[in-house]
Image (cartoon, rainbow, N blue to C red):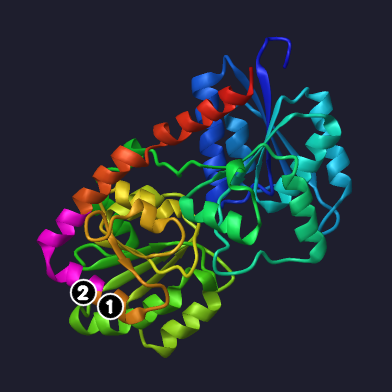
Amino acid sequence: MNASGKKNILQLVNGLGVGGAELKLLELVKYVNEKYSNKYNQIVCSVGHGGPLKKEFEKLGVKVLIFPKIHKFDIFLIFKVAKLMRREKIDLVQTTLLYADVIGALAAKLANVKIVFSWETASHTNNVFHGSIQRRVGYRLAMKFVNKIIAVSGEVKKSLIEWRRINPAKIKVIHYGVDISKFNTSNKILKKKEIGVNGIFPILGVVSRLQLEKGHIHLLQALLEIVKKFPDTKCIFVGSGSYRKELEKKVQMLHLEKNILFLGFRDDIAELLVMMDIFILPSLSEGMPNAVLEAMACSIPVVATSVGGIPEAIINRESGILVPPGDPQALTEQIINLLNISEFRKKIADGARERIKNYFSNDRQFMKFQTLYQSYIN
């Protein structure tokens, strides 16, 4: 506790790059700052590297520290973070992403910080918790000193129990939420003109890192059939990643150059979403993808694979369409069906926004965090 009587929270994260988990952490820190600045003082510390979100955290008025790691697993960071905890008189540590989980929990033990939460955003159901033996042992040791693991979906909770052997009583599910007020249809025509797709139907879109497990390749295969019925189809790939060159080669091989737009990383996601006729996420594995929730908040019909926490957000054929992972034919059929029947598209779109309003709002999500904080901090 600091001199003002506020409780000190350390938010420890593995890097400040622009990723789903890091962006959700930014939203949480902002919310706590705006709603509970009289109760909590927050410090953000990155163990590993900085990134573009450093400035965004600083804009919130919180102290931001970068502790770069010298080695792949820099054990000395444990002592450095423990020293920070003692100096700042930290009352509660919350860690985000695996490396921060290990460093934060072990440092908290050294610094005698009694309250440690881990925010788990990824599901490992379909791939055994990977990494070196040291990494696995380090994680399991660290989790002994964690009070609660916050899972972003029931599926993530299940994978923590099955693959990481976590005691179910230690896990609390708090679903991701979205700020519904950010998503509306303003500037839709303007944004279409900017991208060069004004007047075109249909416009399909994916917002996701360009990595193999995100399943873009299966969407490309589906598009081969979709463009036969809708030759003017434009499919927008938003996001960057190591798989981009492979995808670009595949697009050329399939002669889909006129149908695919690679936009790379963008900071205008809300505006891009509202100009899409259908949002697609063909992932092979997920935790709780924020992009799906945001598309639903925009009243955009979503076709997504039934992996991770996605079925917890989408009620099939009511607030979106679920398809099996790795199944281009199912993607093809469901997308064409939506494009052919405008009334069905509208029904799905309306159901999507209603579901977000009722179950996946930011306020709902972050109030649960506040309740959790309050239950541990006297």
Q: Are marks 2 and 1 in contact (CB under 8 Å)?
A: yes
Residue flagged by tag 2: what amino acid is it? Ile
Q: Looking at the picture, how far across and down is residue 314, in whole percent?
A: 32, 55
4 or 287, nearer to the observer: 287
Viewer can see residue 282: yes
Is residue 337 rendered magenta in the image? yes
Secondary structure, mark 1, is helix
Judged left or right of residue 53, residue 359 is left
Residue underneath mark 1: 332
Judged left or right of residue 108, residue 42 is left
Q: Quadrant of the C terminus?
A: top right
Residue 153 badge: none
367 or 190, nearer to the observer: 367
Q: Residue furthest top?
A: 4
Q: Quadrant of the N terminus?
A: top right
Q: Looking at the picture, how far across and down is residue 106, in whole percent?
A: 80, 42
309 or 36, nearer to the observer: 309
Q: Residues within 10 Å of mark 2 (few under 14, many from 20)?
A: some
Secondary structure, mark 2, is helix
Q: Residue at x 86, y 54 (%)?
A: 70
Residue flagged by tag 1: what amino acid is it? Thr
Residue underneath mark 2: 336
Is residue 186 rendered magenta in the image? no
Mark 2 and mark 1: Cα distance apart in space: 6 Å
Q: Main secondary structure of the magenta part?
A: helix
Q: Looking at the picture, how far across and down is residue 157, in whole percent?
A: 54, 51
16 vs 314: above or below: above
Q: Residue at x 52, y 32 (%)?
A: 369
| Highlighted magenta segment, given as a residue range | 334-348
Q: Residue at x 85, y 57 (%)?
A: 71
Q: Residue at x 27, y 84 (%)?
A: 225
